[in-house]
Image: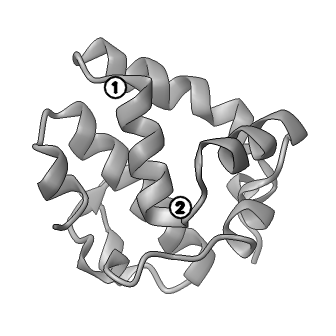
């Protein structure tokens, strides 16, 4: 079963991520660092995906998932991230969880599972 989010462009959701973290006093650069940590994309690669309108499916298909991503646990929208069975959906939830933690003011080293 394919979820609508899989075919949604990252660029259409990204401004919401930026607004969420900035509203809580964090920066777009910090957001980009978190996305980079999870996906392995540097700033230029991330910008290329945003400009190209890459879907979440293709965005994560090309990503090099951080080996520590499995340390991301907890709930997003009442769903435990570690319990999500679909690998793509789990990666999207990882990203949501990291954005939430950043917005909640967690120290960057904790967000990045250092």
Residue 28, image x, y percentages: 44, 25
Residue under label 2: 92
Q: Marks 2 and 1: which is nearer the front? A: 1
Answer above or below: position of 112 versus 30: below
Residue 48, image x, y percentages: 80, 43
Element type where label 1 sits in the image: helix
Answer above or below: position of 49 versus 83: above
Answer above or below: position of 23 versus 20: above
Q: Are there few (<14), some (14-19), or many (20+) residues within 10 Å of tag 1?
A: many
Q: Quadrant of the C terminus?
A: bottom left
Upstream in sequence: badge 2 or badge 1 = 1
Name, please, the residue furthest toward the right: 52
Would residue 93 appear left or right of 69 to someone viewing this image? right
Q: Residue at image x 22%, y 45%? A: 101
Of residues 67 and 13, the one nearer the viewer is 67
Q: Residue at image x 41%, y 45%? A: 33
Answer above or below: position of 1 versus 51: below
Q: Are there few (<14), some (14-19), or many (20+) residues within 10 Å of tag 2?
A: some
Residue 47, image x, y percentages: 71, 38
Residue 61, image x, y percentages: 74, 74
Residue under label 1: 21
Q: Residue at image x 85%, y 40%? A: 53
Query: What is the number of callouts on the image?
Result: 2
Q: Give residue 106's mark.
A: none
Element type where label 2 sits in the image: helix
Would residue 64 appear left or right of 94 to someone viewing this image? right
Q: In this view of the protein, can residue 28 be seen by the observer?
A: yes
Q: Residue at image x 19%, y 67%? A: 113
For the residues labelled 2 and 1, the Cα–Cα distance comes to: 17 Å
């Amino acid at each position: 079963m394919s979820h609508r989010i899989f075919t949604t462009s990252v660029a259409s959701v990204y401004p919401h991520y930026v607004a969420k973290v900035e509203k809580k006093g964090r920066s777009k650069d910090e957001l980009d660092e978190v996305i980079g940590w999870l996906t392995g994309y540097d700033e230029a690669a991330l910008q290329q995906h945003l400009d190209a309108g890459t879907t979440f499916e293709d965005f994560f298909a090309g990503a090099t998932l951080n080996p520590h991503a499995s340390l991301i646990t907890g709930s997003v929208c009442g769903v435990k991230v570690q319990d999500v069975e679909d690998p793509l959906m789990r990666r999207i939830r990882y990203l949501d969880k990291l954005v939430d933690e950043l917005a909640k003011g967690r120290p960057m080293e904790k967000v990045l599972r250092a």
